[in-house]
Image (cartoon, grey):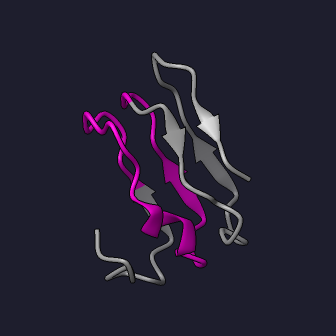
């Protein structure tokens, strides 16, 4: 994903079960994002999500312990 998201005003992002091992930092600056689903991937850390002011639903499950930077 580019450093500046292609879809900065996306409201829903479903990346569930995409076999991701890393979550792009650009997700953390998508300020219009309301729903984010990262379930079923295999990552160990999440990017800084402080700028997700509109988030109302956040789903995440993984087989690993996840370190969250807030």
* Residue 25 vs residue 63, the one in the foreground: 25
Q: Main secondary structure of the magenta part?
A: loop
| 49 to 45, vertically: above or below | below
Side (left or right) of 25 relative to 50:
left
- In the image, 48 versus 40, the foreground residue is 48
Question: How many numbered badges does the structure rendering display?
Answer: 0
Which corner quadrant holds the N terminus? bottom left
Left or right placement of residue 56 versus residue 8 in this view? right
The structure residue drawn at horizontal position 44% and vertical position 69%, both measured from the top left corner, is: 26
Look at 32% across and 36% down and name the residue there: 21
Q: Position of residue 31 (x, y in %)?
A: 60, 77
- Point out the residue furthest to the top here: 63
Picture layout, residue 25 above or below residue 16: below
Q: Horizontal placement of 64 versus 66: left or right? A: left
Residue 28 position, x and y percent, is 55, 65
Queried whether the magenta region covers residue 41, the answer comes back as yes
User: Residue 29 at what x, y percent from top left?
Assistant: 55, 74
**Residue sitting at x 39%, y 28%:** 40
Q: Nearer the viewer, residue 39 or 23?
A: 23
Residue at point 47% right, 24% down? 62
Look at the image and give the residue range highlighted in magenta: 14-42
Residue 33 pos. (x, y %): 56, 69
Q: Is residue 60 above or below residue 34?
A: above
């Amino acid at each position: 994903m580019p450093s500046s998201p292609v879809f900065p005003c996306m409201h829903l992002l479903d990346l569930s079960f995409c076999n991701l091992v890393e979550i792009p930092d650009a997700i953390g600056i998508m300020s219009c994002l309301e729903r984010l689903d990262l379930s079923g991937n295999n990552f160990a850390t999440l990017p800084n999500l402080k700028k997700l002011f509109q988030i109302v639903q956040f789903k995440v499950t993984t087989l690993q312990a996840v370190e969250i930077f807030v």
